[in-house]
């Protein structure tokens, strides 16, 4: 909706936000994701949005290395949304128990190959797999 795009613009500064990619992540006990940037390999992502699907797990903290050198640490619970610059290095610590489930949305600024953000579309449209 226009309201959702306006809010995303206000939060991120992206003028014409488009979904470049969505992915569903699940990490089992013992799994982790090492430090990386979502802009690796020249990907055009401006911001990364992480939405927690549930909180029936232990461990699995999201660590984000901020430009100040500080490391922000977030434990996500069901429905939590974390938005950060895709260029920032980040990781997910080892999951202890349960399965950590998140939806990651990678947003670009008017990428012609991406699907425009429309929160009323179904999941297959948002993934660009109609």
Image: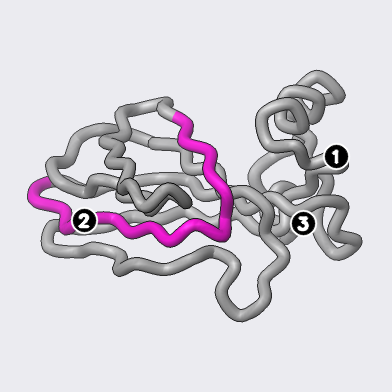
Q: Residue at x 20, y 64 (%)?
A: 31
Q: Quadrant of the C terminus?
A: bottom right
Q: Is residue 4 left or right of residue 94?
A: right
Whether the magenta-drawn stretch holds residue 82 is answered as yes
Which residue lies under the disc numbered 2?
93
Name the N-terminal-most of marks 1 and 2. 1
Magenta span of residues? 81-97
Q: Is residue 66 left or right of residue 120?
A: left
Q: Classify mark 3: residues with Cα within 10 Å, few (<14), some (14-19) or many (20+).
A: few
Q: Residue at x 73, y 50 (%)?
A: 19
Which residue lies under the disc numbered 3?
130
Give the secondary structure at mark 2: loop
* Distance in Å between CA atoms under marks 3 and 2: 34 Å
Which residue lies under the disc numbered 1?
15
**Residue 45 x %, y %:** 67, 59
Q: Classify mark 1: residues with Cα within 10 Å, few (<14), some (14-19) or many (20+).
A: some
Asked if 60 appears above or below 94 in the picture, the reply is above
Q: Residue at x 42, y 26 (%)?
A: 79
Q: Are marks 3 and 2 in contact (CB under 8 Å)?
A: no
Splitting the image into 4 quarters, where does residue 56 fall?
Answer: top left
In this view, the mark in front (3 or 2): 2
| Camera-nearest residue between 79 and 35 | 35
């Amino acid at each position: 909706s226009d309201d959702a795009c306006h809010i995303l613009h206000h939060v991120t500064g992206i003028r014409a936000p488009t979904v470049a990619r969505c992915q569903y992540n699940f990490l089992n006990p013992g799994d982790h994701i090492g430090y990386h940037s979502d802009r690796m390999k020249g990907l055009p992502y401006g911001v990364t949005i992480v939405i927690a699907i549930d909180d029936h797990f232990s461990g699995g903290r999201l660590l984000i290395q901020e430009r100040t050198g500080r490391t922000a640490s977030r434990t996500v619970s069901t429905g939590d949304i974390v938005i950060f610059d895709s260029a920032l290095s980040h990781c997910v610590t080892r999951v202890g128990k349960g399965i950590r489930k998140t939806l990651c949305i990678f947003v670009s600024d008017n990428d012609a190959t991406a699907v425009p953000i429309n929160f009323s579309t179904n999941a297959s449209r948002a993934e660009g797999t109609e």
